Image: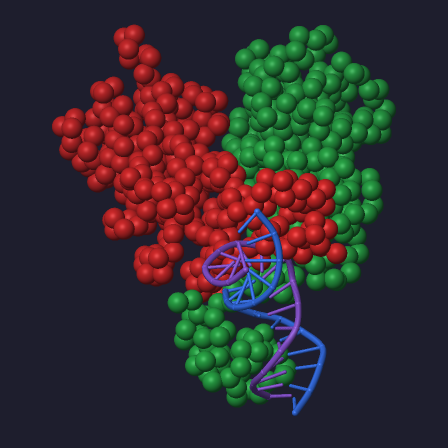
Chain colours: A green, B red, C purple, D blue
Amino acid sequence: MAVTLKEIARIADVNISTVSRALNDSPLITLETKEKILAIAERMNYFPNSLARGLVSHKSETIGIILPKIFFLQGPFFSEVLSGIEQVSVKNGYNILIASATGKKQEKNFPFNLTRAKRIDGMLIINEQQRIRNLLALKKESFPFVFLNRFIKDTQINCVASDNVQGGHIATQHLTRLGHKRIAVITGSLKMAASHERLQGYRAALEEAGIPFDRRLVQEGLFEQGIESGVECATRLIEQSPLPTAIFAFSDEIAIGVMQVVKSKGLKIPEDIAIIGYDNIEYSAHLSPPLTTISQNPFTIGSASCQMLIDILSEKKVENNHIRISVNLVIRESCGYKQKKRA
Amino acid sequence: MAVTLKEIARIADVNISTVSRALNDSPLITLETKEKILAIAERMNYFPNSLARGLVSHKSETIGIILPKIFFLQGPFFSEVLSGIEQVSVKNGYNILIASATGKKQEKNFPFNLTRAKRIDGMLIINEQQRIRNLLALKKESFPFVFLNRFIKDTQINCVASDNVQGGHIATQHLTRLGHKRIAVITGSLKMAASHERLQGYRAALEEAGIPFDRRLVQEGLFEQGIESGVECATRLIEQSPLPTAIFAFSDEIAIGVMQVVKSKGLKIPEDIAIIGYDNIEYSAHLSPPLTTISQNPFTIGSASCQMLIDILSEKKVENNHIRISVNLVIRESCGYKQKKRA
DNA sequence: CTGAAAGCGCTTACAG
DNA sequence: CTGAAAGCGCTTACAG
């Protein structure tokens, strides 16, 4: 029923190894036989059984994407990362297998359930919480992988991540340059490396501007809570006196919550309080006032990590295995850039 | 190097077929030998080579997800669908392979490149534009698949989709019940079935309310353009006289654009013009005024379709192979529900 | 350049 | 209940 090498060999009246050579562009075959065989294969709609092929070649031509939790799939950030991965993988003839590390069984068996099943050639791990122990197990098996969205100190481990330190830095610098001195910050969970790194950039920028760090201006929010979290934290900040003159939110969604609180108190943005966000979500340009923010490049995180993995799989030299993806400052109106310039 | 049945058999001092039986819970084995073998397998961190297993069992335990374009990955809708698929597939021990139908080669070879490669057992096709011809080819190969997010008339083809007719209907009905007679509508591309179906619901609701259909109140927008498209179409609508008293946008993003235009003209929402959206994106609750909208259930679309496919793969009876996922009306303030009730 | 054979790591009838 | 053998559909040394 299924079209196999055997079937094609029978029709072409050659051995199956000859058919295999024709299909694999082997030099060990005359152009004539090759063309005859390819014509037959095409006519029969032949496609190789990738299981059989993989069993002998030890390659599946598939990249595994390891996700922490399903909820990570939500939000435009991950979608963009996935798009980047997808573009590079398709271009290089690789398939993508989504393997969530969710569930007790999966977690217990990770990574052997994946490395030994031979279904994937390498993996891209998107997992803030991934236990280092697991990564070392992978390393010991010398299974190719790239860790996304967070840097591991171990230089043996390949990483691609957004430059959060830079992001925290340029956002804060933008505010200090506009003359702000009391700059509050609303982080994501302090369990996440991203929060710490951005905070590090924030402190560096303060120091450069000669502004002492004030712990009371730091509120710990939650990325998952988004707007709600922004409302809560901003409410606490607004009770302080003197008021902060600027608030740096570690996500645009948090910033949206902040804007709601600030406006509801009758304060003007940016005149009374400047606000800067992080992520440049689509809606941020349509807020009132349009939100100044940091734009990450999730697509590039995806494409760069996938390219690195494919380079490793094809045994190309990888010059730099700790790639930091730059972020950009997107200036709109919530920090009053234009106004100050004119003044 | 790799742990195989052979290796385990050698250590347990039995034949590899006995090892296979132990691992596969076969009744043809004594509890004693089974336990001995399982202990060894666990200690050695054995996991079966899924390629070899699949080659003989003719099952890959993998579900393919076919996407039209990478850009489809963006937006919360698809992410939710994917989450639903993921939850059901993980629970049933299935992996997910993402196979984009993008690229000339892929498009030309679809679906044989997938069905014949034996990498997947069935597929979920998320593809508004997917050519019917391809679906028939799949059907002819009797390859299991479910078509998502659109209904195909052919009852032989399994479909799971949002009830767009219902959505168009209840949104419009909400407006007619509030007394509106001039209800404009901004669709998505009329090339998309979703637009037509919602329009069908819109017309049905008008008819029920005894309101004649007026072609001039229908503007064709573009889902991809979102806010921009809403701005454009609303601008055209606002030039009409008499003005529509309500605007039904086929996406929340379009509705956001509409709100901007309406406000910029000095018109009040909902007093001068009521606005209703579609999708219930996260931000819609935080607009001013909060947007009344239709919420779809993308997670359920994903989980229901995946369950249907798995039922088919496990040869369970599928009672209904055309599943329509209901939508809900989310009443907020942009149509002035509360106000009218009080008045 | 082509063919015959071995083998990738499994499962599953077939003997016993 | 266990083992020996065949076979899934390929690739790739080894002969010729």
Q: Where residue B103 sits: x, y (%)?
A: 50, 61
**Quadrant of the rendered structure where residue A232 is?**
top right
Q: Is residue B5 above or below residue A6?
A: above
Q: Which residue corresponds to the image point at 44% horizontal and 34% vertical from the top-left?
A: B299
Compared across the picture, whether B115 is left or right of A305 comes to: left
Q: Is residue A83 visible?
A: no
Compared across the picture, whether B241 is left or right of A72 comes to: left
Q: Which residue corresponds to the image point at 42% horizontal and 66% vertical from the top-left?
A: A2
Of residues A203 and B7, the one drawn nearer to the viewer in this rendering: B7
Compared across the picture, whether A32 is left or right of B209 comes to: right
Q: Which residue corresponds to the image point at 33% horizontal and 21% vertical from the top-left?
A: B335
Q: Where residue A163 sits: x, y (%)?
A: 73, 39
Q: Is residue A311 visible?
A: yes
Of residues A158 and A301, the one drawn nearer to the viewer in this rendering: A158
Number of numbered discs visible in the structure rendering: 0
Q: Where residue A245 sits: x, y (%)?
A: 70, 18
Q: Which residue corresponds to the image point at 36% horizontal and 20% vertical from the top-left?
A: B331
